[in-house]
Amino acid sequence: MSIAMGGSEASLRYRPTGAYDVDPTLGSTATPGFAEYAGFYSSYRVVSSKAKFAFTQNGSSPLVAISVPLNADPGAAPVFATIAAWASNPYQKHKAIPPVGAPTSVLISTMSTEKIYGSKMVYFDDNFSSPVNTVPVNNWWWAIGIICSPVAAVATNINTVIDIDMDVEFFDRRVLTS
């Protein structure tokens, strides 16, 4: 995936708790294998997620990538100040994306639904689970922000490889007929 950066910030967001549709921007982006399990079960909940984000760029200015799990939707286009504030989140990871020709920068993060909400209720409250044809009411997000100094705003493309693994619990087994 390529992110076009025309100013001092760029961002992406993914909803790992919505294994039925992990990318709300595109829609209908079920994870591989989800449909097969959905044929056997009626409901699911995401217990945890591991995300790996790899970045390269074609520009000459250094950038900073920040990944952070959030328990609220960061929106499709957070502003520079919001993305910069993510750096103070205790669960964030950040790394420089060096100029063109440098090695790939990689961020790896893990988070559980229980940890981000701070309670075991996530295993029992129906708002954290969902039928297999939709997403839960309560979600958390992987937010990815890329920033540079506002005085050195650049026009560049950031090439991104995104790998999100989810630990999904399926339940309410369907009655299968032959």
Image (tube, helix red, strand yellow):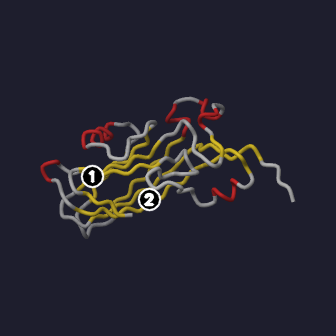
Q: Amino acid at mark 2?
A: Ile
User: Is any atom of residue 131 visible in this view?
Assistant: yes
Left or right of 24, for residue 79:
left
Q: Are marks 2 and 1 in contact (CB under 8 Å)?
A: no
Circle 1 crowding by C-alpha within 10 Å: few under 14, some 14–19, many from 20: some
User: Which label's residue is closer to the chain start, 2 or 1?
Assistant: 1
Among all residues in the image, which is located at the extreme bottom? 101
Give the answer, above or below, for where 33 lies relative to 13. Answer: below
User: Is any atom of residue 94 visible in this view?
Assistant: no
Among all residues in the image, which is located at the extreme right? 178
Circle 2 crowding by C-alpha within 10 Å: few under 14, some 14–19, many from 20: some
Give the answer, above or below, for where 2 lies relative to 172. Answer: below
Give the answer, above or below, for where 4 lies relative to 173. Answer: below
Query: Quadrant location of the N terminus?
Result: bottom left
Is label 1 in a helix, a strand or a loop?
Answer: strand
* Residue drawn at point x = 44 percent, y = 46 percent: 142
Is label 2 in a helix, a strand or a loop?
Answer: strand
* Residue drawn at point x = 26 percent, y = 57 percent: 5
Q: Amino acid at mark 1?
A: Val
* Mark 2 and mark 1: Cα distance apart in space: 16 Å
Query: Quadrant location of the C terminus?
Result: bottom right
Residue 73 placement (x, y as % from top left): 42, 40
Q: What residue does disc 1 label?
A: 64
Residue 13 placement (x, y as % from top left): 41, 49
* Residue drawn at point x = 27 percent, y = 54 percent: 96
Q: Nearer the viewer, mark 2 or mark 1?
A: 2
Q: What residue does disc 2 label?
A: 162
Give the answer, above or below, for where 96 lies relative to 99. Answer: above
Residue 53 placement (x, y as % from top left): 41, 57
